[in-house]
Amino acid sequence: MSKKFTIFGNPVEHSLSPKMHGFAIEGLGLDATYDKTLLLDGKKLKETFFEKGFDGANVTVPHKEEAFKQADEIRGIAKQIGAVNTLVLENGKMIAYNTDAEGFFESTKEFGKIKSILILGAGGTAKAISLIFKEKGTKVTLLNRSESRLISFKEKGFEAYSWDEFKVDSYDLVVNTTSAGLNDSSYPTPKNLLQEILKNTKSAIDVIYNKNTPFLQLAKELKIPCKDGSDMLLYQGVKAFNLFYHDKFDEKEITNYMKKAF
């Protein structure tokens, strides 16, 4: 029986997920389709999932927290994150996971062991990244413009600072999880602060993909090993795909097919 998958988001037009999953479906010779679903009202996510008869779905911004609230069951690290990006139909129930965390962690391996990380921003992606690195025993620090969004991080025991109270330390990795530079030429922090941060780090990643953001441009000028979010997108997709098929396939094989989308 043919399986039906989609990605929910708003906007969703730019998403590479249908291409990635399409190559994996084709390469593995599966009977399935994967399309995009523009969802204007996140509250209708579960209703749409069942109405359209999907076997699984990915969820992108701004619906990850809403999908978390609507899921029949939440598994793994997603429980702590409070946001999900993968939904799987199982015995008539919508089961939710978060593969962003593991996907991002996988994407950092080329930089060696990360003992200390500075995360810029305090949204859903920052939650996923901070928790997976805390789990792996890394020293995690968060930096965000406003104080209010940092409260939940402080409650979980993270070191978290607003721009005004922050003092630069040294880091193995700095990650931009903000949308700065996605549609403009802004930096995730004031430029002079960012320069000081990057001069004290060994590597840098921007979770925005397919774009040479001002953050990445500055890292390159300072000759710091850096990359965009393409690998995170790839690895979270690989893990999501295997959840759709209940871990039936070899991750390396899925990765090889999905890589063609880039």
Image: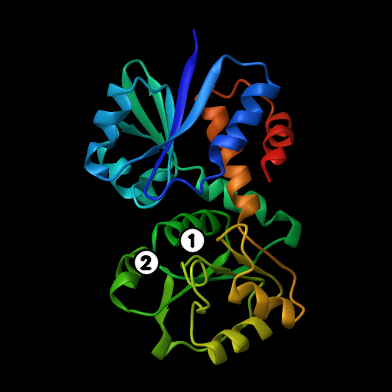
Separation of residues labelled 2 and 1 (CA atoms): 9 Å
> Which residue corresponds to mark 1?
130
Residue 11 shows up from this direction: yes
Percent x, y of residue 66: 28, 45
> Which residue corresponds to mark 2?
153
Q: Is residue 96 left or right of residue 232?
A: left
Q: Is residue 247 above or below residue 195?
A: above
Determine the secondary structure under disc 2.
helix
Q: Is residue 251 left or right of residue 6?
A: right
Q: Residue 162, located in which quarter of the rendered image? A: bottom left
Q: Amino acid at mark 1?
A: Ser
Determine the secondary structure under disc 1.
helix
Between 247 and 185, the one lying in front of the other is 185
Percent x, y of residue 246: 53, 22
Q: Is residue 180 above or below residue 104?
A: below
Residue contact between numbered discs 2 and 1, judged by CB atoms under 8 Å: yes
Q: Residue at x 77, y 79 (%)?
A: 223
Q: Few, some or many C-alpha atoms within 10 Å of disc 1 (few <14, some 14-19, many ≥20)?
A: many
Q: Amino acid at mark 2?
A: Phe
